[in-house]
Image (cartoon, coloured by chain):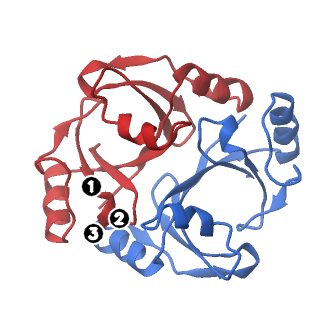
Chain colours: A red, B blue
C-alpha cells in the first residue's frame, strides 16, 4: 500500500542554523523558509535526488511540535511521510488492522495542500508516520 | 555534496512486530532479518520505490543502539543515511566546516560493506547522520 517516502521531517529549534548546516557543510540544495501559521510551523525543504528532508520550526504559541522540542531541545527526527494513492482506503485498511489514526480519524489537508493522516506511534514501534495522498 | 537518501534507520525492540506492522498494516515489501554480529544489530529492510527503511534490533551485549532503546523503549527513528561519492573527501570537507566525525574520524566499513561515517548530532540540529560511499 505505501509508496514513496515523501519526506523525513526533522524538528529544529533554529531553522537558519539547520539550513546552513545542510547547505554549507553537507552541500545540499536548501529551499526558503515558508511560514505555515495554520499548521503552527515554519518549514524548509532540503531537496535530495530521491526524496526531501523537511525542517520544522515551531510557529506561534500552540505549535504541534512544541512538546517534541521540549523533550529534544537540540532537535530530532520527528516523523516519516509515506505516499498512498487513496488516503480514505488507507485509513480504512489501517483501522481494520487495529492501527489508530490520530485526531478524529479523518484525513486532513496537510502542509502541502494534500490529504494527510498521522498514525499512533505506539502502533508502529515508537515512530510517528504521516500518510499523504500522492 | 550529499546525494540520495540511502535509508532511514529505525531502532525497534521487536523486529518481528515491526516487520508485521509494515507488511500487514502498511502493505510494504519487507525483507528477511539479517544478523550482523560485527555491528551489534539485526537488520530488516523495508523496500520503498525510492529508498529504504532499515529496522535495527540490538544483537549481543554491546549493541550500539542499546542506549537509544533504553531512552526510547518503544523504538524510534535513529538516523538518516545520505550517499556521497567520495567518503574521504566528504570527511575532509565536513571537518573543515567544523563538524565532528564520530569515533576516530576515519570512515569504517558499514553494515552494507561500504565505507561509512557518522556525524555528531550536536553539529546537525540533534539528529544523527550517516554518510555512505555510494
Q: Which mark is residue A80?
A: none
Residue B99 lies in quadrant? top right
Between the residue at mark 2 and the residue at mark 3, the CA separation in whole angstroms equals 10 Å
The residue lying toward the viewer, choosing from A55 and B133, is: A55
Q: Which mark is residue A124?
A: 2
The residue carrying pointer 2 sits among few (fewer than 14), some (14 to 19) or many (20 or more) residues within 10 Å by Cα, namely: many
| A7 left or right, relative to B3 | left
The residue lying toward the viewer, choosing from B72 and A24, is: B72
Tag 2 and tag 3, C-beta contact below 8 Å = yes
Tag 2 and tag 1, C-beta contact below 8 Å = yes
Whether residue B54 appears in this view of the structure is no
| A78 left or right, relative to B101 | left
Q: Which mark is residue B25?
A: 3
- Residue B109 in the image: state x and y as whole percent: 81, 64
Residue denoted by label 1 = A119
Between the residue at mark 2 and the residue at mark 1, the CA separation in whole angstroms equals 8 Å
Chain letter belonging to callout 1: A
The residue sitting at 54% across, 67% down in the picture is B70
Chain letter belonging to callout 3: B
Question: Residue B83, relative to residue A66: is it above or below?
Answer: below
The residue sitting at 81% across, 28% down in the picture is B97
Secondary structure category for the residue under label 3: helix
Amino acid at each position: 500500500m505505501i509508496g514513496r517516502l515523501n519526506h523525513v521531517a526533522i524538528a529544529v529549534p533554529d531553522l537558519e542554523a539547520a539550513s546552513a548546516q545542510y547547505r554549507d557543510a553537507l552541500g545540499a540544495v536548501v529551499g526558503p523558509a515558508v511560514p505555515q501559521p495554520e499548521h503552527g510551523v515554519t518549514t524548509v525543504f532540503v531537496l535530495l535526488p530521491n526524496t526531501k528532508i523537511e525542517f520544522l520550526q515551531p510557529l506561534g504559541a500552540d505549535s504541534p511540535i512544541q512538546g517534541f522540542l521540549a523533550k529534544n531541545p537540540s532537535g530530532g527526527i520527528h516523523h516519516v511521510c509515506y505516499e498512498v494513492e487513496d488516503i480514505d482506503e488507507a485509513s480504512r485498511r489501517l483501522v481494520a488492522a487495529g492501527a489508530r489514526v490520530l485526531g478524529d480519524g479523518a484525513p486532513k489537508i496537510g502542509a502541502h495542500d494534500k490529504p494527510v493522516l498521522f498514525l499512533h506511534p505506539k502502533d508502529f514501534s515508537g515512530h510517528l508516520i504521516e500518510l499523504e495522498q500522492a
